[in-house]
Amino acid sequence: MMATRPVEPAIVAELSARIDLIDARAGQARAGDLASELESIRRLAHANGIQPAVTVIHAIDSALARGEHRAMIHGWLSILRDAVGCDRRDADADAAFAAACIVRYGG
């Protein structure tokens, strides 16, 4: 298994702050605006090897495409916050977050 370098705390803090801003505005934001903000988070997470966050954002994109936004997006952002803060970035962690998204979609 390939070793991964730790994510800089400043990157995690930046991603968390961006998620908090989206969460605070989710009640008034349009789905397209949310998707654009999430894309910037996805790019930063991907560049720093935080694959679980990338996986969760793909699920959120699907939720937005299904018409979920505003108050319905809060649960998705909670999962994303957990993915960003997760110390593990291996395939098992990625699969666990994908499973959490499946449960969220079904719940």
Image (cartoon, grey):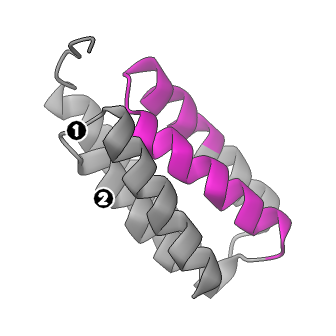
Question: Amino acid type of disc 1?
Answer: Arg
Comparing 20 with 62, the one in front is: 62
Q: Quadrant of the C terminus?
A: bottom right
Q: Position of residue 57 (x, y in %)?
A: 58, 50
Instruction: Bin the neighbour count of mark 2 within 10 Å (Cα to Cα): few under 14, some 14-19, many 20 and up.
Output: some
Q: Position of residue 10 (x, y in %)?
A: 20, 31
In magenta, the rendered stretch is 39-67
Specify the label residue 88 is tagged with. Answer: 1
Residue receiving disc 2: 82
Viewer can see residue 70: yes
In the rendered image, which quarter is residue 65 located in?
A: bottom right
Task: Name the residue: 66% across, 80% down.
Answer: 70
Toward the front, the furthest residue is 1
Viewer can see residue 73: no
Relative horizontal placement of residue 4, taking residue 59 as reference (left or right): left
Q: Quadrant of the N terminus?
A: top left
Relative horizontal placement of residue 14, taking residue 59 as reference (left or right): left
In the rendered image, which quarter is residue 60 located in?
A: bottom right
Q: Main secondary structure of the magenta part?
A: helix
Task: Name the residue: 15% across, 33% down.
Answer: 9
Q: Position of residue 46 (x, y in %)?
A: 49, 26
